Amino acid sequence: MSSELKLPLYFDNNATTPCDPRVVEAMVPYLFEHFGNPASRAHAYGWTAREAVEIAREQVASLIGASAKEIVFTSGATESDNLAIKGVARYNARKGKHIITVATEHKAILDSCHALEREGFEVTYLEVDSEGLISLDALRDAIRDDTTLVSVMYANNEIGVLQPVAEIGAICREKGVLFHCDAVQALAWLPIDVKAMNIDLLSISAHKMYGPKGIGALYVRRGRPRVRVQPIIDGGGHERGMRSGTLATHQIVGLGKAAELAEQSIKSGEVDKVRALRDRLWDGLRANLDELYLNGSWEQRLPNNLNVSFAYVEGEAMMMGIKQIACSSGSACTSASLEPSYVLRAMGVDVELAHTSIRFGLGRFNTEAEVDHALELITEKVRFLREMSPLYEMVKEGIDLKSIQWTAH
Ligand SMILES: *Cc1c(COP(=O)(O)O)cnc(C)c1O
């Protein structure tokens, strides 16, 4: 059976997705044949490239219910997040120097906020509950007269948890503060309407939705109240002065095609097939194994994400054991320290359990046969590792681990 499968199985689609072949096909002509600079106004090479860029701008805008003029191309969502956070905060510094975000945001958001703190801005980091969700009342209470921006992600990259974006947008609009949303993880899976959701700025990345790496966009709402951002990259004044630099035509064409395919996929129900695969994996794991803990809300969650703690099985050991499955571990250190995932810690998951967490990210190209093979591999490995775990043994014998006085302490 496994001989037909491409190994290792790719179950890490929250980290990056492969480029869809239809995206690759759309991009190739813009490398050699149509290589012009979209800013060259005097000849056909430039016009052809510009036309392709403008079609892509429409495709990206259409995915989120925006208009093409509201899309600014960037090098990816890290840059989009930086531009949104620093750009809005700095532009509005005379109005106020307070911004609000969440403890479980992506590092591109958190580190941009830390940079602002060093410049004298004040940042409130909202807490999340055990499901990974923020409290709307806490958000309301955190908004002050000097608050200029609220930044809350749509879907979390580790646990897939969805924040109540429309409700957050309504609160921000009512209070007169701008709302930025990092929607990178949601774009391929959920419908987004920036107008209905009152989103003022929204970060986009191509490589989490079957497009190429190194390209993204920032939606910046036009109309009243006007959203202004101070640029980070200065130069030729491209992208209405918000982001200078020669436009990467082939990358932009790829992002546009990926956006078009994402819109089709959401409308056609292809997303439900991926959800069914994710559910098959979770149901199978629960049928085969005990002591499993789901991390993050089940109801408010991306259809392709599963984040599970396999109690008594250290994440890194597990990863070594299931090398035939490409996935991520919550114990993988983002720094040199042994701190487990800050997202899990913010939800109150205890350190031990956080160290046993594994993130599975299903995707468009996964199959039922792959899920079934993964189930076999994981089940076998977890049983094997637990057989060697004295702690698991003790729990099975009915001993309450919390009641034990460990002499090493
Ligand atoms: C991947 C990711 C980013 C960074 O995007 P890049 O295009 O890789 O820079 C930002 N936010 C979230 C939620 C992500 O998942």
Image (cartoon, rainbow, N blue to C red):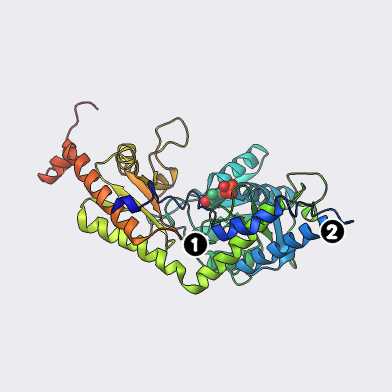
Residue under the point 62% across and 47% down? 214
Q: Against 207, is 332 above or below?
A: above
**Crowding near pointer 2: few (<14 within 10 Å), some, many (20+)?**
few
For label 2, the residue is 44
Residue 406 seen in the figure: yes
Q: Nearer the viewer, mark 2 or mark 1?
A: 2
Q: Which of marks 2 and 1 is nearer the N terminus?
A: 2
Is 278 positioned to the left or the right of 13 in the image?
left
Residue under the point 55% across and 70% down? 264
Q: Against 338, is 51 above or below?
A: below
Task: Give the image quarter of residue 65.
Answer: bottom right
Residue 179 seen in the figure: no
Quote the CA–CA distance across marks 2 and 1.
56 Å
Q: Position of residue 309 (x, y in %)?
A: 31, 48
Q: Nearer the viewer, residue 306 or 33?
A: 33
Q: Against 133, is 320 above or below?
A: above
Q: Which of 173 and 34 is in front in this view?
A: 34
Residue under the point 64% across and 69% down? 62
Is 297 positioned to the left or the right of 54 in the image?
left
Residue found at the very far top of the displayed protein: 408
Q: Which of 384 and 233 is in front in this view?
A: 384
Residue type for callout 2:
Ala
Secondary-structure class at tag 1: helix
Q: Where is residue 349 in the image (x, y as percent from the top left)?
A: 35, 47
Q: Against 327, is 263 above or below?
A: below
Residue under the point 56% across and 68% down? 263
For label 1, the residue is 137
